[in-house]
Every structure is written in C-alpha cells, then in structure tokens.
Amino acid sequence: MMSQHACGMLFDVFSISRLVVLVSLVATTAAYGQDATTRAEADRQRRAAKNESLEPYEPGGFERAMHFVEDRAVFIVGREGFYPKLGSLTTGSGFAYGLGYRDRDLFDKVAVVDLWAATSTRRYWATEARLTFPRLANKRLMVESWAAHRDYPQEDFFGIGPASVRADQTSFAIRSDFLGARAGIRPLPILLAGGGLEYQRPRLGRGKDERVPSIEQRFNAFAAPGLAQRVDYLRSTAFVELDYREPRNARRGGWYRLDFSRYADRGGGQQTFNRVDLDLRQFVGFLAERRVLAGRLLVSTSDAASGAAMPFYLMPTLGGNDTLRGFREYRFRGPHGMLAQGEYRWEIWSGLEGALFYDAGKVAMSRRDLNFDGLERDYGFGFRFNTDQAIMFRVDAGFGSRDGKHLYIVFGGIF
Amino acid sequence: MASTSTSSSAEFFRRPAAAMLAGLLSVAAASAVWSAAPRFYPDDPLWSDDDRAFDASKVVAVEDGNGYDFAVNTFGHPGERRDVRAMNVNTIDEVPDSSWFTNRIGRNAITVADVVRGPDRVDRISLDGWTVSGGKSTGVQPGFRMTDPRGTLHQIEVDPPSNPELASGSEIIGTAFYYAMGYNTVDVYLAEIDRTNLVISERSTIRDPLNGKRRPLRRSDLDDVFDRAARLPNGRYRVLVSRFAAGTPLGNFRYYGTRPDDPNDVVPHEHRRELRGARVFGAWLNHDDSRGINSLDMLETTNGRAWVKHYMFDFGSILGSGTVFAQRHRPGNEYIFEQRPGWLTLATLGLYVRPWMLIDYPEVPPSVGRFEAHAFEPEKWKPEYPNAAFDNVRPDDAFWAARIVARFSDEMVGAVVKKAQYSDPRATEYLTRALITRRDKVLATWLNQVCPAVDPRLLAEGALTFSNVAVDARAATPAETYQLQWFRFDNTTGTRTSVGDSQTVVTPAGRAPAGLLDGTDYVGVVVTARHPEHVGWMRPATFFFRRGGPRWTLVGVERG
C-alpha cells in the first residue's frame, strides 16, 4: 500500500501545472464575470472559459499501476491456462515457484484439470496432474484422480519417538510417485464421505542438507524403520468430513475429519499397516466475530507394533510452522501422535489479524502412551494477512520450547 | 490525481508558500469579480444550472477499480478539504436542477405514490420474450444481462441463498429514496425468473471470471449465477431487473475534482452540495458504499449537443445488506482502514474493543440482514473509506439534506419498504420502524446545528413570517426566543447597514422597523434562536429580500 507521503509526491508532480490552470481559470472567469448581467450568463462564461482550456484525461502513474494490478495481475496469479505456481511444496520446502496449466471449466464446467511443475528455494521439486469432477450428481458426488512425482532432497529426521534429540538431526531424500483416485458423496452440503485408492512408490536416498549428516550416517534400519527397504504401497482410504466453518477462513463453526488408511505392502505384506487420523477444529467468534478462539485436536494412530512395520517417512510428525511452532520442522516422528493447538486471533484491520498461540503435542511409540503426559509445548505470536476465504501470508514466531525460538514466514494458512 | 484539477491543487495547498501564492492570486481574481459583479443578479435565485451548455462529446471514460478508489481515498486525501460554502448552491442556499440533481421531494409536493414509483417507467415488468444477452462482469452480486423484445438492455441480479430478498430489496428501497431525494438513478424492478426457460442470444458474451477474456456466454455461466442464488419455493428465482441508463457509459464520477475534459463540469465535486449532503442520506440509509465506483456517468446527446449525466448507482449494499451476505458489523461505523483503532487494537492484543463490536443487533428475518436504529449515531456514521465531499460537509450542507429527509413521512417510508415485497411481513415492519427511527435521529442531529428558520416571507407592509423546520419535523421543541436584526443591503457594494435594534420575539414572526422598506430595493434580516438544548440555533440564518413591485421576494439565504 502506498504511503501517504509517497502518494502525495505522486500527485505533486502534476500540481504546478494544475495550479496554473486553476488560477488561469479563476482569472479568466473574473474577466468574463465583469460583463455578465445575469447569473446564468456568469455561469455560462465560467464554462466557456473552461471550454477553451480543456485537457484530455491523463491517469497518473499510480492510477495506471493500480489499474494494471486490478485488471491484469489478479488474472495472472489466478488465471486460466498457463499460470505461475507459487507458494510451498511441503513443510520446509522453502518458497516454491513453477509453471502450471489449468482448465477449471473443462467439459462445460463439469471438470477441473490442473497440471503443474515447480521447484523451490531448497531445491525441492514436484509435478502433479489432477483431474477433478467436483460437482457431479447435482453437487452430491465428487470424483478425482491424480498422478504426481515429488522429489524432496533434504527432509529432516531426528529419530523416532518422543525422546529424540535435536543434536541428532540428519536429513534424507525421498522421491515418491503417486497414482490415485478417490470419490466422495455429499449427502448434505456440509458432509462429505468417501474413499479412494492410491499407489505409492517412495524411494529414499542420501540427504542433501550439507549442514547435517545424511540419515544413514547416524541411524540404522532399526532406529529408522523402512530405511533399508524399497516398498511400494497400495493405500486404500475411507474418510468422513464435516465442514461448517463460516466463512472459509473461519470465524465460527467447525471442521472435523476422520481418515482411515490401509497401507498395503505390494511386495510381500511385511510392511502393511493401518493408520487412523482424527482432526478436529473448532472456531468460536466473539465481539462481532472480530475475535476468534480457534482450537484444534489432532490424533494419529496406527497398528504398527513399536513402529517396526511402519516406515518412518509415513509416520505422523510434529514440529514446524503448522504443528509445534517452537520446534524445527519434523522434529518428532512416531507411529502415534497427538497435537493440541489453541489460538486467539484478533482483527487489527480488515485483512490483518494478530494471533497468540499455544501448541502442545507428542509422539508415542505405543498407543497407550498417547495421553497428556510429557507433552512438548510452545507458545508464540503471529500476524496473518487474510481474506474471508483464506490466509494468504503469515508470520509466526514460536517460543518456549526446549528447541529455542523459531520464526516462520509462510505463504499460506494454519488450521 | 492527475485527472482532476482540484485534487492535485489540494496537495499543492499543503505547502505554505504555494498556498500563499495561490491564495493571493485567487483573492486578486475574486476581487475583480466582486468589485464588478453584484451580489444578486436579476435572475437570482436560479433554479436551473445549465450544465449542458457546451458540447462534452470529447469526454473519455474514467473507470476506477476497487483497489485504486480505496487506496487513493484512504491514503491520498484527494480533493480540496476546506471549510467553504458549497459552490453550486443558488443564492437562497438551494441546489438548482442540473445534470447531477433534480429537485423533487425537497421542493415539490409529491405523493406517496410518486415516491414509491421513483424512476420506474412501468408498474411491473415481465421477462417473457426476453433473451440473455451477456454476462455481468462487475460487482459482487451474481447476475447477467437480458434484452427485452424492444432491444433495451437490462441487468439481472439475484439474492444470496443465505439471505433471500436481501440485496434486491435494498436496491429497490435505495433507488426509490435516492430518486425522490433528487439524484439520477436507473429504474429497477422485481421479477421472477424460470432458469429453465432462459434463451441465450447467439451473440451474448461474458468476460471470463477466470482469465478476464471475453468469450461466448454458456448455459453453465447461468448455472453459476443460479448456484449462488436464493430459490423461491416455486422453483423460480426472484431477480432484480435494472434498466441500463441511456447514452454512452463514461465510467464513474469521483467525489472530488472535476473532469478536465468536460467543459460543463466546473464545480469541484467535493464542493457540490448534493454530494456533500449525500453523507446525510448515506447515514440514514446506511449507504456505506457511497463511493465513486458506485456512481455512473453517461454521455447523452440532446439537440445535437453531448452532455454528461451523473447517476447514483448500486444500492444493493445499503440498509442491512452486504450484497451477498448480511452486512458486517464494521461498515457504517468505521473506515476499512482507520489508524487509531487499528493501532490500539494491535497494542492491546485486541483488548481494545471498538464500540461497534458491542452493538446488539436484533433477531430479524434474513432478508433484512444486519441493520439497526438504536445504536445509530448519525454524526459518527462513516462510509467504507474517506469521501472528499463527505469530509467537507458543513452544517448548512447537512441542514439542506436533513430538510429533504424530513419530507419523507412515515407513510412514505412504509410504502417504499413495502415496494421491496419482502415475503416476511416482519421484515417490512422492522425495516420501516428502523428507518423511521433513524430518520428522526438524522433530523434531530442535523436540523439543529444551525438556526432552523426557513421559508421566510416578507409582506409589503413589513410583516415577516418564517417556519422552524426542526419544530415542524418534531426534532425539537419550540425556541424560547428568536432574535431578529434587520439591515439594509447595497447590492452593488455588498454593504449591510443595520437598521433598528435587535428584536426579540417568541414566535417565528416579526416586523421590519419603520422606514426600513422605504427607498431601497434590498433588505435583510438576521435570525438567531435560543434553545436550551440546541446551541446551533445561535448560528444565524440571514435572509435577503428584493423588492419586486409591491412584494418582497426572497433572494438570498446564508446559514452559519
């Protein structure tokens, strides 16, 4: 937003010439006015004076720039056809940029196709093709399919379980291919239930983060289950989702999702496991909904005994800009995990919110340890640039953890 | 603003040296005028401003965007902000008819039916035989365009599913009121539409909302509109039908400056009485969207000469409507960006509570949206962002507008609300009551900031009568006393010479001192009033009379 001073400078460029015109107009009017014998004639003479000094309309630089932004730039970002893919690929990927192609009214608005490829400042890259039929059967049925490749060269790994230590930080690379489809029915506008299938082909490699050792230099296959295997999975899922947030960047309402996944090992079954994720988000607005209390409870559990049959890279993680914000990304991993987050959000101006937050969570090696004992905690504050529909950009600063202070600058929202 | 003379000059005036230079030159020029021109011309007061006198065919369109309009008005402070009398009023402090404004209820005795009818040409409208002729590419309200069998273009808009009748009702009510006040508005109607029977013209196009490019309109584009529309129990849709104004679109006008390419546009818009006074109307009707982009300029041609007609446009978010949802709490109470409350909120982590957050809105039908009258404080009301004309409002401007508001009787208010055809009678009843309450608050606020003496008459033998509009509007109890100071006026030099002592009367009447009316063509009287609750009544109203044969005619009014 242009500052008042800058704006004033912009206008001043035109001031001198305008003043000359203004004074000339007044003076000319005076000259004409001396001869008028009626009010109507005096008024006419005033207009006659202006008629002799008409100027074409000339928009200023700021006005032209704003017109460009409003008429063109908006469509460049959200445009149909080729578009710039900007944002983030995954937690910790850094800022991503790339090129996409989309058609959101395919088959006369029945389907959406979206193809993109992007890389990031931390040399992550990914590509994806997705075909979605979001409004079949009078909006009661959605179907989508996708194929994707992701190449994440420096994912963090600190060990499994709640006792992992920061000094053990390593990195690993993971390249994955995905091919999947899912369908959902919407018996009510706020309720979606369905299931899907996805073929996953993850492959691990040496971590590319030069600041820390690669994973195999510090952990073996026992400490990092799945490190030594090359496993393909067929993931079958069933889910139910209730969404009654108002508006989408919620000020009231809730969003609840229960997700069941079976990861079937296509190479013999030893690595087969089931995972259940429950994500509950609740929003309570007050003071004209310009203040919001937001709460989230996330629980993830699996039937993998002691993590032996569940590869570490498919375990739930905690730490980073959207979970435990006082910790590094992926700071904790385990076969089971839980996270509780609370935020107090207050609107400063339309489009800018402040937030105070508190996060607590843990990972566990067994389900019975999934309780409120020994939770990792942090707190902090943040600022969000938002619309009614989404948070576009946020800055969160996390404190109070045993991991020190963390600042996150994120193109995107939080729960 | 490069486009306007006054906006840039306003920036210039912030510099002391430049301001002094400009002031000296202006004074010198003005002196020339005043030294030669009489205070009152023979044809004063003028009731028609011939602002179609010169051909304006070279005017180009100015179409501001939301972002630009917000930014420039919020941070740029365009236009000239100073305490100066409105520049387009006639000598009796009224607004003459022009391309901007036509005196209707303010000057003429119009009926309830006239107010209800507004600009409409017909009583009701049927969409039989109409074709869909294009998409709607501006504004947030979903809609499209249709052409009637005679080829006239109309805009069709729907209401949000969450708030049936909300935006259309507001548009109907706002149009009727603003038209009766005197503004140019397009005619609007309510109709029902059956989406399955819509016929799309082969030539109809739409600006694709996804990429901004124009392409043929498809059935699915209409589906998108109706997907976001409130559906009637009979499966049809209530729609608002707005007739396109005649002429060539020139975009919007601005509430500041003048069009540099329009020879007829000589009064800076921030100094136009009807634009300043729109703040009063905006407060009454909660027209928080009172901004340049909700206006419309059209180039019309009469007798071979082109001229610009200025419209007030888009009342879909007045009253309790936010167009596609019930109005939020802030609009009408605080600008989108206002420094002080924002910094306070930031510094106190939200413990500072803006007063409007505590307003308790009553439970009302969804068609009403969010609208109330009890917490309403007219002087604190604000549009979405600063408006140069509104910022220049003086007590005399507000008084002028409030007098117009006072002309809307309870019956008129009720009849206009009824025109919106709310299906729930509680909506009609509530809105009527709220508007009447808000009207009374508007009158109590702005009729009492100056001496409310109006309609003075000076009879040949010297008897003076006048009215107290605040008392007549039940916005105040009668004055304790009125003070009258008579004077003789020299129209050539502008000199006033007091005659006699100040008179104190208890009723709105008086008598000219003996001898005052003899041997002179111009006399005047300064009226002030004393009221324990209204100090504004001490602000004088000055009336000038001119001899016209045996009668005296009101020729000048000054307030404040």
Image (spheres, coloured by chain):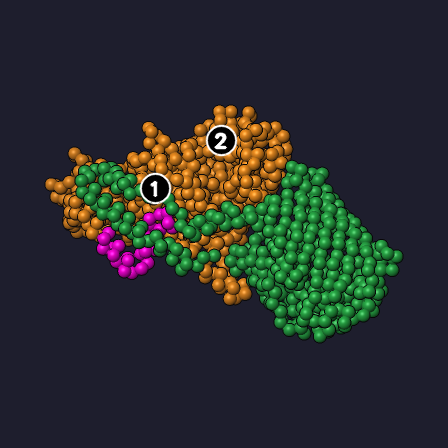
Q: Label 2: how many residues lie within 10 Å, few (<14), some (14-19) or many (20+)?
A: many
- List x then y, in percent, for residue A271: 85, 60
The vertical placement of B439 against B344, above or below, is: above
Instruction: Please report the bounds of the magenta region as a residue range.
Output: B1-26
Residue B261: numbered disc = 1
Residue A302 visible at all? yes
At 41% from the left and 56% from the top, the residue drawn is A7
Letter of the green chain: A
Q: Tell me, yes or no, whether the highlighted magenta stretch contains residue B23.
A: yes
- Please tell me which residue lies in front, B134 or A341: B134
Q: Chain ID for label 2?
A: B
Mark 2 residue element: strand
At 73% from the left and 48% from the top, the residue drawn is A146
| Three-letter amino acid code at the position of disc 1 | Asp
Q: What distance separates the C-alpha of mark 2 from that of mark 1?
A: 28 Å
Q: Chain ID for label 1?
A: B
- Please tell me which residue lies in front, B286 or B263: B263
At 65% from the left and 69% from the top, the residue drawn is A326
Q: Tell me, yes or no, whether the highlighted magenta stretch contains residue B313.
A: no
